[in-house]
């Protein structure tokens, strides 16, 4: 889950990394008050979970509180890439001598976190890595040994940074690495990390001017305190796309009991409803339907032997989705999920909606555990079914063929 | 022969009294020549039995009862307790750990993997179904009940490696139907960080005389395919590889995860199309459809040249 900038800055601040004296607000009048308190030129920044806000006009500079208020009003009403801002950040415009970059991410191949540091900040680090590779330092660190400051020192020194700057940067990068580990993050980035202009002691010191952080969803349960402090509710998933009512209804179906999974419903706008599984099977089947020119109405996953009620609930949801002409019930060979239970669930769904299973179910292709029992039920209702001798791809083809033959 | 496990492999099941673990234990005992499940661990349940397998409070008790080193453990405890369970297994001399549990934060997984590396142990998973040597032994829920597993898996020359548990069985079944059995099939898990990637299993298959070709199932997300491509190129592998890539549609939906936790397109290298190109460059054939795989791998084996 991605944090908004104002939340990431708060995390950075709590870790003891210097930040500017910014303020967050959802109200333009309050933005003027914050600018007044700051007492100088400010930057008004849209708080959205999407990139490219600068280009979109989501970052504006103000010299007076009145300007700050006007900019805040504009930005609060500005949609960026389909996202409305959560609020605005009012930030003092710091006099910066140089912008640096510091970040920590996972390296899935080495299976360790890797610190990335560069004296060239303020732009995308991947761009720096491409154009000035000698200006980017990387260093992995252990998952089980305590993080030690020399590790931060090494990655900074490797980019040619020395002198007072090096000594001031070591504690910052160290704290960032520790924040990453302690909060189960998948990304912790300060960019730009500004070195202030002017004379010592203010000049030459460092301050985080923007931060980007993501916490792993699986670990949210152990950071309840932090999330509560930041005002992040349990229901906030912050997916790349906000859940639609259809998707929320899918979550409800899955949550009705704890037996197995019949969920992860994602909405598409086609006419072929999919009741598919499991993880890899769903990915394969979705591709196959599209490869044959089919238009899926949804993505979903069944697995772990869900109850009849859940399979039924999922099938009903998909059958009732506007535009759905038929459903295809397909899975890779099952060994835990029972074929007969899914068969019963989808037939029950059709019957309860007053639909003919033989008409509405384009194909049922789930081979594996309890298939004889399942196929018997399907036969009784005249539903076309297939065993493992029919590939996932062929099953998808048959389903698409039936839809294309159906009246639009 | 096989990789990782054989008829003599002894293992325990950690979390053995859970519903899924009870079934899994039954399945392993019933399959092939019958797995040597020498004990189970659930704290507080010392003295019980699960299908005749004695239950202990600690791994140390299980090892003491067995009277010799135990080769492996299947870990099925809830995510919050998995790290401790795996550490316990490793510190008691267990060298092969199959983690079934899903939804473990990757920081925990990375810690387990690092300790395993230090102790010369190997982790398969998490979020996997385990390992099967057709007609001999299975370690984990892979293939399901013995009868179902026997229907899908047959002995033969193909090594199977898959990021999806269910698709391990789907692909092996397709191979079996075409007369191509499997030397060993490994469900490596669907998470972003896993104990053993394709490239880390390749040396074992390379050293296994029975194995003549490799079939892999892959998905968007992560750099595991790039790592395999590099390994194959650098090591002049004798083994031809055919890959199947699912989730091609995800390229149009960056930042969203489908199927498994590890399938999120975070950068250009994570996309299906980029991976397909990378695999192809290394001489790995990428199949469009699963039913094409048996013909492709057979042709490559008969050509006698991996690339």
Image (cartoon, grey):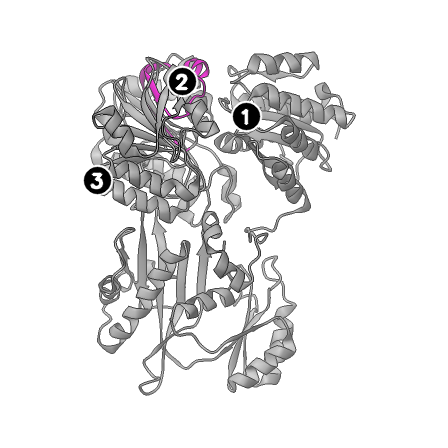
Q: Chain of mark 3?
A: B
**Residue A391 relative to residue B88: left or right:** right
Q: Secondary structure at mark 2?
A: helix
Q: Quadrant of the C terminus of chain A?
A: top right
Distance CA(mark 1)–CA(mark 3): 40 Å
Q: In the rendered structure, which disc, 2 or 3, sits on the residue that comes first in sequence?
A: 3
B307 or B168, which lies in front?
B168
> Where does label 3 land, which residue?
B119
Image quarter of residue A269: top right
Q: Vertical placement of A402 versus A3: above or below?
A: above
Q: Which mark is residue A331?
A: 1
| Both marks 1 and 3 on one chain | no
Q: Which residues are magenta?
A: B136-163
Point 50% across, 30% down: residue = A284
Q: Vertical placement of A167 versus A268: above or below?
A: below
B278 or A360, which lies in front?
A360
Residue B160 image offset from top left, x and y in percent? 35, 25
Q: Residue furthest right?
A: A354
**Residue A146 relative to residue A340: left or right:** left
Point 31% across, 86% down: residue = A200
Indicate yes or no whether the magenta region holds residue B161. yes
Q: Secondary structure at mark 1?
A: strand
> Where does label 2 land, which residue?
B175
A262 or B207, which lies in front?
A262
Q: Chain of mark 2?
A: B
Residue B132 image offset from top left, x and y in percent? 35, 22
Q: Secondary structure at mark 3?
A: loop
């Amino acid at each position: 889950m991605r944090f908004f900038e104002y939340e990431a800055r708060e995390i950075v601040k709590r870790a003891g990394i210097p930040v500017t004296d910014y303020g967050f607000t959802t109200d333009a009048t309050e933005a003027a008050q914050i600018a007044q308190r700051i007492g100088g030129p400010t930057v008004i920044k849209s708080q959205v979970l999407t990139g490219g806000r600068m280009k979109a006009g989501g970052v504006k500079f103000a010299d007076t509180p009145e300007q700050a208020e006007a900019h805040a009003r504009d930005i609060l009403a500005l949609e960026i890439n389909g996202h409305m801002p959560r609020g605005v950040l009012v930030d003092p415009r710091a006099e910066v001598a140089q912008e640096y970059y510091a970040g920590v991410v996972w390296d899935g191949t080495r299976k360790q976190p890797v610190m990335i540091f560069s004296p060239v900040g303020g732009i995308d680090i991947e761009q720096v890595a491409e154009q000035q590779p000698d200006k980017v330092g990387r260093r992995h660190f252990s998952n089980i040994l305590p993080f030690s400051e020399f590790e931060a020192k090494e990655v900074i020194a490797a980019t040619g940074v020395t002198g007072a700057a090096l000594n001031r940067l070591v504690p910052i990068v160290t704290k960032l690495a520790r924040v990453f580990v302690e909060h189960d993050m998948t990304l912790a980035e300060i960019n730009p990390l500004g070195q202030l202009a002017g004379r010592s002691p203010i000049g030459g010191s460092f301050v985080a001017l923007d931060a980007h952080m993501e916490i792993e969803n699986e670990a949210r349960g152990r950071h309840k305190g932090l999330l509560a402090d930041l005002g992040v509710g349990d229901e906030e998933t912050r997916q790349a796309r906000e859940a639609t009512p259809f998707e929320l209804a899918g979550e409800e179906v899955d949550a009705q009991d704890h037996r197995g999974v019949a969920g992860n419903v994602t909405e598409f706008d086609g006419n072929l409803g999919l009741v598919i599984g499991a993880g890899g099977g769903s990915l394969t089947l979705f591709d196959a339907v599209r490869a044959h020119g089919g238009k899926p109405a949804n993505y979903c996953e069944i697995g772990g032997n869900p109850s009849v009620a859940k399979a039924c609930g999922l099938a009903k949801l998909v059958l009732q989705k506007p535009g759905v002409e038929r459903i295809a019930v397909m899975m890779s060979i099952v060994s835990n999920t029972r074929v007969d239970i899914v068969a019963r669930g989808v037939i029950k769904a059709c019957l309860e909606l007053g639909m003919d299973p033989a008409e509405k179910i384009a194909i049922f292709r789930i081979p594996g555990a309890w298939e004889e029992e399942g196929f018997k039920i399907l036969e009784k209702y005249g539903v076309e079914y297939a065993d493992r001798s029919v590939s996932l791809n062929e099953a998808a083809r048959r389903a698409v063929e039936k839809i294309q033959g159906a009246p639009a | 022969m096989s990789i990782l496990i054989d008829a003599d492999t002894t293992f325990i099941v950690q979390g053995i009294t859970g519903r899924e673990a009870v079934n899994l234990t039954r399945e392993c005992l019933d399959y092939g020549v019958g797995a040597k499940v020498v004990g189970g661990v659930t704290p507080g349940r010392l003295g019980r039995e699960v299908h005749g397998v004695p239950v202990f409070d600690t791994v140390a008790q299980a090892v003491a009862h067995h009277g010799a080193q135990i080769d492996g453990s299947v870990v099925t405890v809830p995510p919050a307790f998995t790290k401790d369970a795996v550490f316990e297994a490793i510190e008691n001399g267990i060298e092969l750990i199959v983690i079934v549990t899903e939804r473990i934060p990757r920081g925990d997984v990375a810690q387990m993997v690092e300790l395993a590396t230090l102790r010369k142990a190997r982790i398969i998973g998490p979020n996997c179904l385990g390992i099967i040597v057709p007609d001999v032994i299975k370690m984990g829920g892979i293939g399901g009940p013995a009868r179902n597993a026997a229907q899908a898996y047959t002995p033969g020359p193909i090594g199977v490696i898959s990021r999806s548990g269910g698709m391990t069985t789907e692909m092996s079944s397709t191979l079996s139907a075409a007369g191509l059995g499997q030397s060993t099939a490994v469900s490596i898990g669907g998470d972003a960080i896993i104990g053993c990637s394709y490239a880390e299993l390749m040396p074992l298959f390379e050293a296994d005389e029975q194995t003549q070709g490799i079939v892999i199932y892959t998905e968007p997300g992560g750099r595991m395919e790039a790592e395999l491509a590099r390994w194959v190129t650098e090591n002049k592998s004798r083994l031809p590889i055919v890959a199947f890539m699912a989730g091609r549609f995800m390229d149009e939906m960056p930042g969203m995860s489908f199927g498994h936790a590890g399938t999120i397109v975070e950068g250009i290298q994570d996309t299906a199309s980029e991976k397909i190109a990378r695999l192809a460059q290394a001489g790995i054939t990428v199949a469009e459809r699963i039913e094409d795989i048996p013909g492709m791998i057979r042709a490559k084996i008969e050509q006698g040249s991996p690339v």
